[in-house]
């Protein structure tokens, strides 16, 4: 069987007659073979097609050869053969050629579903194909003895031969559509090699495209977006084209969205006042071409086809793909904060023994706080008596000589005076044994004993019921002592007065006799600690070193500094700790 096709380059008026392809030639055979395969294909499968030139202007399907179709069909490759001029074939009459040219593009389009089906199966874009079934088409078919013939993208059917809902009718349509491909020179009309499964698995990635199913299909050429479509996919395409093609100065202007839309696609956006209309018309087609030219997305002939398929959509997707946020640099692990150094212990602060928690040492600390102020009261006298540096040097030498002279007799007194003259003001810890052996301390501890007995009586009297067995009391008491006197002692010259604190655990046992309320007691524990402030009081004088006024002059001139003194805690071993009895009347 044969078919009729035509492809005329340039102005058809320069060729008054159209050449008719021969029935049974290789193009007819190929068209039958393609149509057969199309009829056997399930949905979604397609053929690879190649566009090639032809000097045959019209190809027709022979009406008389209908009975010979099954005999003449032969399998061929999955590519449609390039048509070549072989010098064979008849020519139409001048009137028929004129009729064909005058009716070009005036037929009806196939339904959208049918267009998509045949485009997918044959592998070409048949959006622009026109179907002619009018009386004129019937008359032309009868004149050349054809069931149907094809000229470019126009297919003319004989009476009742266009019936795509029937098996024979669809076979005939597929046959003629194959001739459309054979005659078409445009590379982009013909679909490229079908995408592989790996290629199909790659989807659009840009946020504006990736969730639209129609765009994903167009990206897979299944099928591409076509002229006349109206949907959200076209709307997204239009907006992307506007955004990309808008000049920078317009994109940066006030009301940039409206201005860009008005400049790039005025008709589709109502002069920029509305969103894109989503209709693939002439303006969208031309804008796609502009985009393709901008990025060099041209066909083999160097032309922009205006059809958004995989290459065009792929470029748009690349341009609008979300810029990946740079991975935040890992924050350097903060250097571990150095453990805060323990605050250095204040060496100038009294450190009370474990048993001396309630011991009041404020009399000593208050005395040291007032020491500088007391010495300042003799500043005028100091300036009068020691007006020059040399005078002060001689005064300091005098007391340092005392230290040397008296060290063998009064070692602790000499040490304390020298510490004062050195001016550090740091606390000094004196040996508790020096206090423990001193008579003034033993006298002071006797006073403490009496205070503890008095305290025990008060506690018993405060009881709601008199004790019938032993009870224990924890008590503390502090008082001033004075070691200075004649004859001089090392402790007396080293501190003079001092504060003595006692902490006791006193066991009291009822021991009544003849109806008299009597209690026996013993000190199961007695701890002692001494404290002092080494300073000088104007108005006093100590024969050991001279006068307090002179020593204050040295402190006022930063040649001496008062300081705290304390002992470590020690246990009382003197008679004051002896057991005894007391009466309550």
Image (tube, helix red, strand yellow):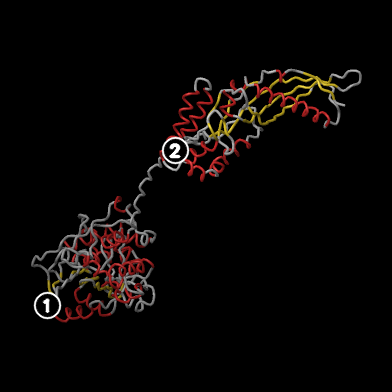
Instruction: Give the residue pinned by disc 1.
Output: 15
Whether 142 is drawn above or below 476: the answer is: below
Q: Position of residue 225 (x, y in %)?
A: 31, 66
Circles 1 and 2: CB distance less than 8 Å?
no
| Distance Cα–Cα, label 1 vs label 2 | 135 Å
With 417 as the anchor, is 163 left or right in this view?
A: left
Q: Position of residue 127 (x, y in %)?
A: 29, 69
Q: Residue furthest right?
A: 515
Label 1 residue SS:
loop
Q: Nearer the viewer, residue 332 or 393?
A: 393
Residue 43 in view (yes/no) = no
Q: Position of residue 76 (x, y in %)?
A: 20, 55
Whether 259 is drawn above or below 116: the answer is: below
Q: Nearer the viewer, residue 337 or 79?
A: 337
Label 2 residue SS:
helix
Residue at the image point whose x is 54% and y is 43% from the top: 378
Q: Position of residue 529 (x, y in %)?
A: 62, 27
Residue at the image point whose x is 46% and y is 31% from the top: 398
Q: Nearer the viewer, residue 398 or 260?
A: 398
Quadrant occupied by the C terminus: top right
Instruction: Give the residue pinned by disc 2.
Output: 392
Image-quadrant location for residue 312: bottom left
């Amino acid at each position: 069987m044969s078919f009729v096709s035509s492809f005329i380059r340039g102005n058809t008026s320069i060729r008054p007659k159209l050449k008719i392809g021969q029935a049974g030639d290789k193009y007819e055979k190929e068209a039958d073979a393609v149509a057969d395969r199309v009829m056997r294909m399930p949905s979604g499968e397609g053929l690879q097609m190649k566009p090639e030139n032809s000097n045959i202007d019209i190809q027709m399907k022979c009406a008389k050869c209908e009975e010979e179709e099954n005999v003449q069909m032969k399998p061929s490759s999955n590519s449609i053969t390039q048509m070549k001029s072989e010098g064979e074939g008849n020519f139409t009459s001048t009137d028929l050629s004129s009729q064909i040219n005058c009716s070009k593009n005036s037929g009806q389009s196939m339904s959208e579903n049918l267009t998509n089906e045949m485009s997918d199966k044959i592998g070409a874009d048949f959006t622009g194909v026109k179907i002619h079934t009018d009386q004129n088409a019937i008359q032309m078919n009868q004149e050349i003895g054809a069931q149907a013939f094809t000229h470019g993208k126009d297919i003319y059917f004989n009476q009742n031969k266009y019936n795509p809902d029937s098996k024979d009718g669809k076979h005939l349509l597929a046959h003629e559509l194959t001739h459309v491909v054979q005659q078409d020179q445009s590379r982009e009309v013909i679909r490229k090699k079908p995408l592989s499964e790996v290629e199909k698995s790659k989807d659009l990635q840009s946020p504006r495209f990736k969730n639209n199913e129609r765009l994903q299909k167009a990206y897979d050429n299944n099928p591409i977006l076509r002229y006349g479509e109206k949907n959200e996919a076209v709307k997204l395409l239009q907006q992307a084209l506007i955004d990309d093609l808008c000049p920078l100065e317009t994109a940066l202007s006030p009301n940039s969205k409206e201005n860009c839309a008005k400049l790039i696609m005025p008709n589709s956006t109502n002069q920029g006042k509305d969103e894109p209309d989503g209709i693939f018309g002439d303006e969208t087609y031309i804008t796609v071409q502009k985009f393709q030219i901008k990025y060099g997305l041209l066909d083999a002939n160097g032309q922009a086809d205006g059809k958004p398929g995989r290459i065009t959509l792929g470029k748009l997707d690349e341009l609008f793909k979300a810029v990946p946020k740079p991975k935040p640099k890992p924050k350097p692990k903060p250097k571990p904060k150095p453990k805060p150094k323990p605050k250095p212990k204040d060496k100038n602060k009294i450190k009370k023994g474990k048993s001396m928690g309630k011991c009041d040492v404020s009399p000593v600390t208050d005395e040291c706080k007032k020491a500088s102020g007391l010495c300042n009261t003799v500043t005028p006298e100091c300036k009068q008596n020691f007006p020059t540096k040399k005078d002060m040097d001689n005064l300091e030498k005098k007391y340092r000589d005392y230290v040397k002279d008296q060290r063998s007799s009064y070692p602790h007194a000499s040490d304390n005076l020298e510490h004062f003259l050195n001016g550090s003001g740091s606390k000094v810890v004196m040996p508790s044994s020096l206090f423990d052996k001193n008579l003034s301390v033993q006298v002071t501890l006797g006073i403490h004993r009496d205070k503890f007995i008095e305290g025990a009586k008060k506690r018993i009297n405060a009881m709601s019921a008199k004790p019938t067995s032993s009870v224990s009391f924890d008590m503390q008491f502090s008082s001033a002592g004075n070691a200075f006197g004649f004859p001089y002692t090392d402790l007396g010259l080293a501190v003079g007065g001092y504060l003595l604190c006692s902490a006791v655990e006193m066991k009291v046992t009822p021991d009544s006799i003849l109806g008299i309320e009597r209690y026996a007691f013993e000190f199961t524990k007695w701890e002692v600690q001494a404290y002092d402030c080494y300073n000088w009081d104007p108005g006093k004088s100590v024969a050991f070193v001279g006068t307090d006024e002179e020593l204050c002059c040295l402190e006022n001139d930063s040649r001496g500094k008062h300081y705290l003194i304390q002992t470590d805690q020690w246990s009382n071993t003197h008679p004051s700790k002896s057991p005894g009895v007391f009466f309550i009347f």
